[in-house]
Structures are given as C-alpha cells and as structure tokens.
Image: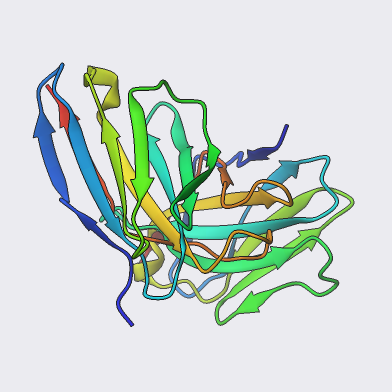
Amino acid sequence: AQKITQTQPGMFVQEKEAVTLDCTYDTSDQSYGLFWYKQPSSGEMIFLIYQGSYDEQNATEGRYSLNFQKARKSANLVISASQLGDSAMYFCAMKGRDQGGKLIFGQGTELSVKP
Amino acid sequence: KAGVTQTPRYLIKTRGQQVTLSCSPISGHRSVSWYQQTPGQGLQFLFEYFSETQRNKGNFPGRFSGRQFSNSRSEMNVSTLELGDSALYLCASSLTVASPSVEQYFGPGTRLTVT
C-alpha cells in the first residue's frame, strides 16, 4: 500500500526566509510521481511542483524546489524567500504507476509566514 | 485557458436528501477525478473517469456515484446524505491517466454541509 507522511502539522517562518516542509513516502512501485500542492483558505488546490521517481535531478519551479532523496524515501519541499502569500496548507501527494489518476495525499502542513 | 470549474460552490442539504455536484475540466482534458476532504480523514480519492468510463474507485459506499459525459464534464451524486458527508468535494482534471507524471489540476471545490 502507498502512504504519504507529513510530520509537521504546523510551521512558522519569517518573511523572506527559506523553509523546508517534510514529506516521506512508502511504496513498492518502481515508477511513481511525487507532487506538492498548496491550499489557501479559499479551498482550491494549487499545483506547485512534480518529481518523478526516475528523475536524477531535483525539480525546481521558481521559488519552489523539491529535495528528493530516493533511498530515504523523502521528498521535501523547499520554499525560498517566503512571502506573506505563502501562508496556506501544503500537501504532499503521490501517484503510482498503476493508479491512474489516483493521488494519495499526506495530512498536510499549515505554513504561517510572519512579517 | 479556463481552469477547472465546479458548481455549485456551496450547498446545504438535509440528512436523507441526495445531491449532485458538477465539474467541468480544463479544455482538452479527458480525465476527471473526485476527492473528498474532511478535517478528520483528510483528502480521500473517490473515483476517476476517463472517456466516459470509470477507471478507478476509492473506498466509499455505493451511495457515492459519478458519471462523465462525452464533453468530459463530470457529475458526482451522493444519495441518502449523512451528516458525515459534510465535506469539501474537489474535482481534478488531467490530459490523460496513463502515467504517474501526469499533473492534475484542481477546481475550487464544492463545500457541502449536511444538517
């Protein structure tokens, strides 16, 4: 069975500083995808970044980067230069090779950015 | 390009009633997935449709059903509503379902309250 674990229910970061949100996963699939989504209080899930299990380089998208350590089964999200608008829930998710469109989500981390 | 749209955005129903939620995917996307989000259970996969066929189903009772039309728009129906069905229902669309790397884009959700 596939599982995503996010151990940080809530985190605080000072504006303009970097922050790392932790995510570990468990799967027996060799081919899988890892995703991070942001959910503001409005409810919409916003896609941030993707990492494939066979990708050798860590994914980056603007201020977001994914620290992928396959042997440790971790896929931490790093947000650089935090902004007040980054305050939201962040979800790590995984999709396996034979899962079609089924995403398995972690419990989420609530990030608060302080001015 | 318009994003995923969901209607209605908010809904209040009484126990025992039924409800139908609608999702219009991004133009050109043929896969639609549905998720239920509650504070207690987090984000859980309901089902996925591709080319009008249900491709994958989560662990929900038969009261939850869905369908997809030829224009890729999807509806989900919940019959005999229970208090525990109160949740944010999110719809996600993607181009296809064949690969773990395919990104899913979410709509704003429908917030259902059952009284």
Image quadrant in which you'd find residue B5: bottom left
Please name the residue shown 85% across and 48% down the image. A72
Residue B94 seen in render: yes
Residue A20 image offset from top left, x and y in percent: 62, 59
Residue B108 seen in render: no
In the image, taking residue A17 as reference, residue B68 lies left or right, namely left
**Eyeballing the image, is B3 above or below B99?**
below
Count of numbered circles in the view: 0
In the image, taking residue B79 as reference, residue B29 lies left or right, namely right
Residue A82 image offset from top left, x and y in percent: 47, 71
A101 or A13: nearer the eye? A101
A79 or B111: nearer the eye? B111
Please name the residue shown 45% across and 35% down the image. B42
Please name the residue shown 36% across and 45% down the image. B67
**Eyeballing the image, is B35 above or below B79?**
below
Residue A3 image offset from top left, x and y in percent: 67, 36
**Eyeballing the image, is A94 above or below B64?**
below
Residue occupying the far front of the picture: B70
Residue A95 image offset from top left, x and y in percent: 65, 51
B95 or A86: nearer the eye? B95
**Eyeballing the image, is A44 above or below A11?**
below
In this picture the colour scheme is rainbow
Residue occupying the far right of the picture: A71
Q: Quadrant of the N terminus of chain A?
A: top right
Q: Quadrant of the C terminus of chain A?
A: bottom left
